[in-house]
C-alpha cells in the first residue's frame, strides 16, 4: 500500500512538472509569436497599405512589452495602462482607415470617450491588478464594437467591396481582432477573481489560455499580411453597371 501511494505521488509530481513545462512553453511561444506576422509584413512591405503599417506597429509594440515582462523588466501597473492607451490608439486608427473615415465617426468618438473615462477611473484607483484589467476588459469590448461596425458597414462600401485589392486581408485582420476581443472579454473579466482566489499554478494555467489566444491572433495577422494585395479584381460589364448605379444612388442621398 505504501509503495502504491509512493508511486502515485511520483506520477503526480511528474504530471505537475509536465504541466508547468507546457505552460512555460506556451508563454515563450506567445512572446515569440510576433516573428511570424512581422516576417510576412516585411515580405509585403513595398505593397502594403496604411492599415498594414498600423498593425505592424501594434505587433512591434506588443512584442516589446511582452519581452520586457518576460525578462522581468516591466513591473509597474501604470506602464501597462500606458501601453494599453497606445494600443487602443493604434487599433482605433486601423478602424478609422477601414470604416470610420468612410461611414461616419460617431461610434469611434463615443468609444474614445468611454476609453478615456475608463482610463481616468483606473488611474485613480488603488495600485492593484484591477487598475489594468478593467481597462483591458473595456478595450476588448470596444474592439468588438469596432469589428461589428466594420462587418455591418462593408455592404455599404461598394468601392471597398468591388475594387479594393486588400479587402480579403482587411477582413482577416478584422476577424482576428474580433476573435481575440470576444474571448478576452471573458478572460479579463475573470482575471481579478482568479488572481485573488487561486494558487500560482492555477493562475499560470489560466493565463496560458490567454497566451494561446494571443498566438492565434498573431497567426491570423500573418495570414492577413500574406493575402495583402492578392485579391484579383475582375468585373463583367453588368457588374460594373450595377456598381455605377449603386454609387449614383449614394451620391444622390442627402448628407
Image (cartoon, grey):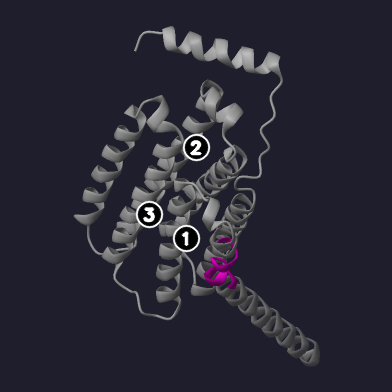
Which numbered tag is attached to residue 14? Answer: none
The structure residue drawn at horizontal position 54% and vertical position 51%, both measured from the top left corner, is: 47
Q: Are marks 2 and 3 in contact (CB under 8 Å)?
A: no
Q: Are marks 3 and 1 in contact (CB under 8 Å)?
A: no
Depth check, mark 2 against mark 1: the one in front is: 1
Instruction: Point out the stretch of residues depicted in magenta.
Output: 29-37
Q: Are marks 2 and 1 in contact (CB under 8 Å)?
A: no
Quarter location, residue 14? bottom right
Which numbered tag is attached to residue 87? Answer: 3
Q: Is residue 8 magenta?
A: no
Classify the position of the C terminus by image quarter.
Answer: top left
The structure residue drawn at horizontal position 43% and vertical position 12%, both measured from the top left corner, is: 251
Counting residues from the start of the chain, the first of labels 3 and 1 encountered is 1
Depth check, mark 3 against mark 1: the one in front is: 1
- On the image, numbered disc 2 is attached to which residue? 147
> Seen in the image, is 127 located left or right of residue 11?
left
The structure residue drawn at horizontal position 57% and vertical position 56%, both measured from the top left corner, is: 44
Q: Secondary structure at mark 2?
A: helix
Counting residues from the start of the chain, the first of labels 2 and 1 encountered is 1
Count of picture labels: 3
Dot 1, how many residues are within 10 Å of its Cα: few (below 14), some (14-19), or many (20+)? some
Classify the position of the N terminus by image quarter.
Answer: bottom right
- Which one is in front, 89 or 11? 89
Q: Position of residue 185 (x, y in %)?
A: 47, 47
Please, is residue 123 above or below residue 36 in the view? above
- The Cα–Cα distance between marks 2 and 3, rounded to whole angstroms, is 16 Å
- The Cα–Cα distance between marks 2 and 1, rounded to whole angstroms, is 18 Å
Counting residues from the start of the chain, the first of labels 2 and 3 encountered is 3
Q: Position of residue 19 (x, y in %)?
A: 65, 75
- On the image, numbered disc 1 is attached to which residue? 59
Q: Position of residue 36 (x, y in %)?
A: 60, 65
Amino acid at each position: 500500500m505504501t509503495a502504491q501511494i509512493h508511486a502515485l505521488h511520483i506520477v503526480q509530481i511528474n504530471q505537475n512538472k509536465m504541466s508547468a513545462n507546457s505552460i512555460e512553453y506556451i508563454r515563450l511561444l506567445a512572446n515569440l509569436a510576433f516573428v511570424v506576422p512581422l516576417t510576412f509584413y516585411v515580405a509585403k512591405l513595398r505593397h502594403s497599405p496604411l492599415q498594414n503599417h498600423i498593425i505592424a506597429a501594434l505587433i512591434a509594440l506588443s512584442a516589446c512589452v511582452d519581452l520586457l515582462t518576460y525578462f522581468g523588466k516591466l513591473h509597474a501597473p501604470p506602464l501597462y495602462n500606458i501601453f494599453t492607451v497606445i494600443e487602443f490608439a493604434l487599433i482605433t486608427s486601423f478602424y478609422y482607415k477601414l470604416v470610420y473615415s468612410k461611414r461616419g465617426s460617431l461610434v469611434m468618438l463615443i468609444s474614445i470617450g468611454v476609453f478615456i473615462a475608463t482610463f481616468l477611473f483606473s488611474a485613480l484607483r488603488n495600485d492593484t491588478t484591477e487598475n489594468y484589467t478593467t481597462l483591458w476588459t473595456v478595450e476588448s469590448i470596444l474592439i468588438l464594437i469596432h469589428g461589428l461596425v466594420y462587418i455591418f458597414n462593408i455592404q455599404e462600401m461598394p468601392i471597398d467591396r468591388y475594387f479594393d485589392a486588400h479587402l480579403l486581408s482587411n477582413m482577416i485582420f478584422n476577424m482576428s481582432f474580433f476573435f481575440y476581443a470576444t474571448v478576452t472579454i471573458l478572460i479579463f473579466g475573470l482575471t481579478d477573481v482568479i488572481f485573488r482566489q487561486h494558487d500560482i499554478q492555477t493562475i499560470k494555467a489560466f493565463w496560458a489560455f490567454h497566451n494561446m489566444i494571443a498566438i492565434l491572433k498573431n497567426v491570423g495577422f500573418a495570414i492577413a499580411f500574406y493575402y495583402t494585395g492578392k485579391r484579383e479584381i475582375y468585373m463583367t460589364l453588368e457588374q460594373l453597371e450595377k456598381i455605377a448605379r449603386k454609387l449614383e444612388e449614394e451620391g444622390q442621398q442627402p448628407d
